[in-house]
Image (cartoon, rainbow, N blue to C red):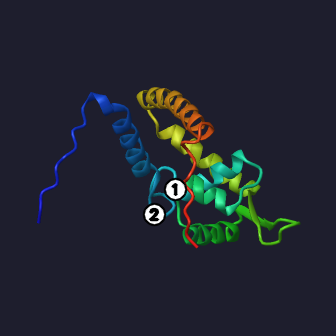
């Protein structure tokens, strides 16, 4: 077995290191199994996205949450059964499905967001305010990347 060299994370790449650290911490906080595990599970993330947008396609959720299509299908089926979301087909393209949040889904989301607010201390809220500003800046960077073409995927010649 060979030893892997550790990458030198000096001040010149503090931005990229911070992005990775934020992502890792956010994932650990957000994810979990069961209703009470994790501060904001995939189910709650779906409800949050659907609450922000009127209708969302499965493809949009897969891209936003970075989850497998099969995992979304299982979760969406359960959420529909529980009455948190509804699905409907496009009137023109019958194969395209859209999800939207129900009133019950909004209640569940509001309760979860309230619980998060209750758990967070004053110091944590200050940090979140700073992170919120950082997220706004990162969204600007993301949009700039998309507008100048660096956010586009390369096409392949696969047949």
Label 1 sits on a secondary structure element that is loop
Q: Is 11 situated above or below 67?
A: above
Left or right? Give the position of 107 relative to 89: left
Please name the residue shown 24% across and 32% down the image: 10
Q: Dot 2, how many residues are within 10 Å of its Cα: few (below 14), some (14-19), or many (20+)?
A: few
Q: Position of residue 136 (x, y in %)?
A: 56, 31
Tell whether 80 sits left or right of 131.
right
Work out how far the residue at label 2 is from the one at label 1, CA to CA, in angstroms.
8 Å
Taking the view exactly as shown, the residue that stands out farthest to the right is: 91
The foreground one among 145 and 110 is 145
Residue 78, horizontal then vertical, whole percent: 63, 70
State the quadrant of the N terminus.
Answer: bottom left
Q: Nearer the viewer, residue 26 or 4?
A: 4
- Reading the image, the residue beneath label 2 is 33
Q: Earlier in the sequence, mark 2 or mark 1?
A: 2
Instruction: Report x, y in % for residue 31.
Output: 45, 55
Q: Residues within 10 Å of mark 1 (few under 14, many from 20)?
A: many
* Total numbered labels: 2
Residue at the (12%, 57%) spot, across then down: 3
Residue 41 bears which disc, if any? Answer: 1
Mark 2 lies on a secondary structure that is loop
Percent coordinates x, y for residue 43 in the rendering: 58, 59
| Most foreground residue, 39 or 61 | 61
The image shows residue 142, relative to residue 108, as above or below, that is: above
Q: Is residue 147 above or below residue 82?
A: above
Residue located at (76% from left, 54% from top): 55
In the image: residue 85, left or right of residue 33: right
Which of these two is toward me, 136 or 145?
A: 145
């Amino acid at each position: 077995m060979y030893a892997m060299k550790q990458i030198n994370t000096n001040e010149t790449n503090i931005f990229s290191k911070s992005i990775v650290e934020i992502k890792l911490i956010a994932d650990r906080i957000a994810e979990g199994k069961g209703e009470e595990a994790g501060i904001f599970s995939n189910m709650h993330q779906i409800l949050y996205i659907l609450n922000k947008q009127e209708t969302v396609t499965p493809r949009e959720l897969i891209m936003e949450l970075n989850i497998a299509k099969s995992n979304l299908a299982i979760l969406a089926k359960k959420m529909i059964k529980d009455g948190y979301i509804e699905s409907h087909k496009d009137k023109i393209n019958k194969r395209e499905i859209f999800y939207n949040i129900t009133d019950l889904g909004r209640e569940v989301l509001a309760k979860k967001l309230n619980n998060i607010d209750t758990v967070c201390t004053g110091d944590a809220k200050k940090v979140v305010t700073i992170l919120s500003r950082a997220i706004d800046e990162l969204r600007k960077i993301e949009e700039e990347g998309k507008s100048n073409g660096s956010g586009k995927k390369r096409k392949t010649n696969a047949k």
